[in-house]
Image: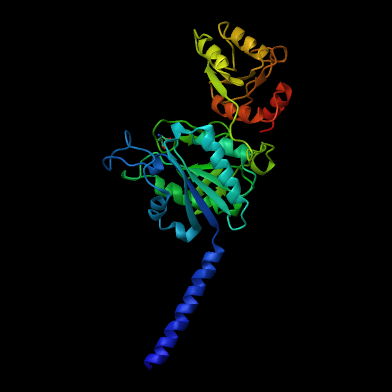
Amino acid sequence: MTMTKFASALAVCTALLTSAVAFAQDKLPNVTILATGGTIAGTGATSTTTIGYTAAKVGVERLIEAVPELKKVANVKGEQVFQIASENMTNDHWLKLAKRVNELLAQSDVDGIVITHGTDTIEETAYFLNLTVKSAKPVVIVGAMRPSTAISADGPVNLYNAVTLAGSKDAVGKGVLVSLNDQINAGRDVTKTNTSTADTFRTPELGFLGYMQDNKAHFYRQVIRKHTAETEFDVSKLDSLPQVDIVYGYANNNRVALDAFVKAGAKGIIHAGVGDGSLSNAMKPGLVEARKAGVLIVRSSRVGNGIVARNGEANDDELDFVVSDTLNAQKARILLMLALTKTTDSKAIQKLFYTY
Ligand code: DGL
């Protein structure tokens, strides 16, 4: 074969290969990774450092480079929205993140979003976005329990699964999802159940939505409460959220913290009561006075599972209190903050707690 013929054959092969790759990439979903910090971006002094490391050090491009397999499952782009340990998450961070998620999901060339996040407040960000994302496209929040420098770091495989899930048509319309450790949880119900183990994220009584296995999402449950595309909450024009604080119930408690929150201007109080949201004789008068002063009061429970029954441990009709249904205190706080951007009517707010 002459050099000319060889060169032209090579050119044809190259062109065919290029178009085959382009065709294959066209078939892959477009997933944007929004990085916010946390352990998944953390570094430790040694490969065996799994506590006492520094979170929020590694940038989004390095997180993507560390998992070249991502290219097989999606066309991935990365953005560093902020870089924090998630115990420092604020309402401002949430508003910025929700607005960016909604901007991206409104684009036809974005099929899904992954958010890398510290695990300490993943459950709160997940519920906030479950109530404020205006799209049915998948939004998957992922973190890690071991820093990127540790032996068997869980971040890379969690990120790979999260991108696979965010690009999956089966994840459309499922609400905001939290996926670590090959498991899929719903944003409304997921909670962190262990301070340090890789299987920490669970939905204790209502269960996982499904699993990640063999590069695919396997769903077994649907969420029936309203979320994402059906939400009535709109943060697009909000620059702040009403102040809502949490007071904790325990034996021999008092109203000092409650009174301080009200004095500082809290618009709502979540009471994380013992048992079925019970109110102690020391705390109840403070809650009644706060309600009379116009502060919205929600009876939640420190227990973490089960329904807080209306008019059970307190006469909510008479006291004009709201109950949190099955939402734990930190999630009830998020729904009350958003509810207060729309209404201060306690009956309307109670309806929202039975809807979302
Ligand atoms: N500082 C914690 C956070 O950013 C580390 C926990 C983690 O991300 O796993 O939430």
**Along the line of sight, the residue nearer the viewer: 280 or 208:** 280
Q: Which residue lies most toward the left here?
A: 46
Q: Which residue lies most toward the bottom here?
A: 2
**Along the line of sight, the residue nearer the viewer: 209 or 226:** 226
109 above or below 16? above
Q: Residue at x 51, y 37 (%)?
A: 93
Quadrant (top left/top right/bottom left/bottom right) for the N terminus: bottom left
Q: Is residue 148 left or right of residue 74?
A: left
283 above or below 140? above
Mark yes or no: residue 203 visible.
no
Q: Residue at x 57, y 29 (%)?
A: 331
Rendering coords of residue 31 (x, y %): 53, 54
Rendering coords of residue 40 (x, y %): 40, 43
Image quadrant of ligand 1 equals top left
Q: Quadrant of residue 57?
A: top left
Quadrant (top left/top right/bottom left/bottom right) for the C terminus: top right
Rendering coords of residue 109 (x, y %): 59, 58
Rendering coords of residue 100 (x, y %): 56, 46
Mark yes or no: residue 51 visible.
yes
Q: Which residue lies most toward the top here?
A: 281
Q: Quadrant of residue 187?
A: top right
Q: Residue at x 49, y 10 (%)?
A: 251
338 above or below 80? above
